[in-house]
Structures are given as C-alpha cells and as structure tokens.
Amino acid sequence: MIITCPNCNKQFKIDSTQIPNEGRDLQCGSCNHVWFYKIEEANSETLQLKEEITTKDVETKTENKEQILDQKNQPLKKIKTEINNEKKDEISEKQKTVASSKNTDNKASKFFSYLIVLIISFVALIILVDTLKTPLINVFPDLEMILFSLFETLQDIKLFIIDLV
C-alpha cells in the first residue's frame, strides 16, 4: 500500500500487514513528521444511477452540435490550408538553400577526410617498410639503395616542413 505524509506529501510504499486494524504512529523518512495512521475501509456499495437518460435526446443534441461545428470550421479550414501551404513553401525553400550549402561543405569535408586517410596510410607504409628493412634487403639486395633514397627524401621533406613553420 502507498501512504502519503500529510506534512511534505512524500509517498512511501508500506506493507499493509505492518499496520494493525486499530492504526499506529508513522514517521516520515524525509521530514521526520510523526502522525497517526489508520487503515480506512473502502465503501463496498456500488454507485447506482437513479435517473434514466433517454438516448434519443442526447443523440439529437450531439448531431445538432456537430452540424454547427462543421459550419463554423469550414472557413477556418480554408484559412488553415492556405497558411499551411505558405509554411510548406517557406520550409521547402529553406531546405533547398540548406541542402545546397551542405553539399559544398560535404564535398570539402570528404576531400579532407580522404586526404587525412591517404597521409595516415602513407605514414603507416613507411613505418612498416622501415621495420622490415633488414629482412627485405636480405631477400631483395637491390632494394637497399631504393630504401636509402626514400628515407633521404623523407628527411628532406621533413626539414622543408620545419623550415616553413
């Protein structure tokens, strides 16, 4: 059962077997308020309707109201559709401008993404070749001169970039 503190309205879930029929004092764990709580039995009597309502009167009244509402809503529907059409046109124009600007931004970002991937792949290849330089030279003796030239070229590029900065 759920009990609510009368002081701070905090709710607590309490097992109903912990509260006897004659009631007991409870203390709120939030505000420390103490109050007497007794389990109240709910009314077992069912509610009964004493008057009978004729459904014909209700149906005719609702039909009349629906007809009046339909007549009132017709001009509103026209205005709403015009406003909605104008909003749709404005939104489509905004989307077109945003889409065109996104396409140019998207192309530039794609280019830089590919460029970064290319640079990282090239650096990884150089590191791999440098790591496996000795076994490769043992298998391909003429490769020593090519690798030496490659590493010298990379050193020159590195020095060039350092001078630019």
Image: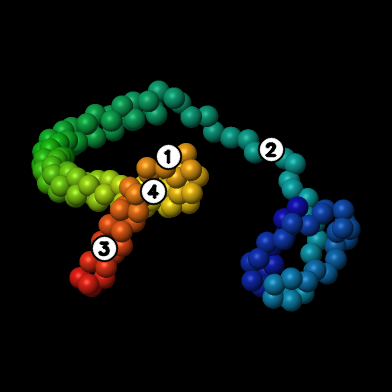
Q: Residue at x 48, y 49 (%)?
A: 134
* Residue tagged 4: 144
Residue drawn 70% across and 72% down? 30
Pointers 1 and 3 in contact (CB under 8 A)?
A: no
Note whether 139 is above or below 160 in the view shown. above
Using the rendered image of the protein, determine whether residue 98 is visible from the camera's viewpoint: no
* Residue at mark 2 to residue at mark 4: CA–CA distance: 101 Å
Kind of residue at badge 3: Asp
Query: Circle 2 is placed at which residue position?
Result: 46
Q: Report, in whole angstroms, how far the alpha carbon at label 3 lies from the one at label 4.
A: 18 Å
Outermost residue toward the bottom?
Answer: 32
Q: Residue at x 25, y 61 (%)?
A: 157
- Image spot of residue 86 (x, y percent): 10, 42
- Of residues 102 and 110, which is closer to you in this image? 110
Q: Which residue is mark 1?
A: 140
Compared with residue 141, is residue 1 higher up or lower down, i.e. above or below?
Answer: below
**Which of label 1 and label 3 is nearer to you?**
1
Q: Kindly report the distance in space between the C-alpha atoms of the residues bearing marks 2 and 3.
A: 97 Å
Residue closest to the far front: 141
Between marks 2 and 4 in the image, the one whose residue lies nearer the viewer: 4
Residue 161, position as x, y percentages in the image: 24, 66
| Residue on which the image places disc 3 | 156
In primary-sequence order, the first of circles 3 and 4 is: 4
- Alpha carbon distance from label 1 to label 2: 100 Å
Q: Are marks 4 and 1 in contact (CB under 8 Å)?
A: no
Viewer-side residue, 136 vs 113: 136
Instruction: Pick the quarter of the image with the C terminus.
Output: bottom left
SS assignment at label 1: loop
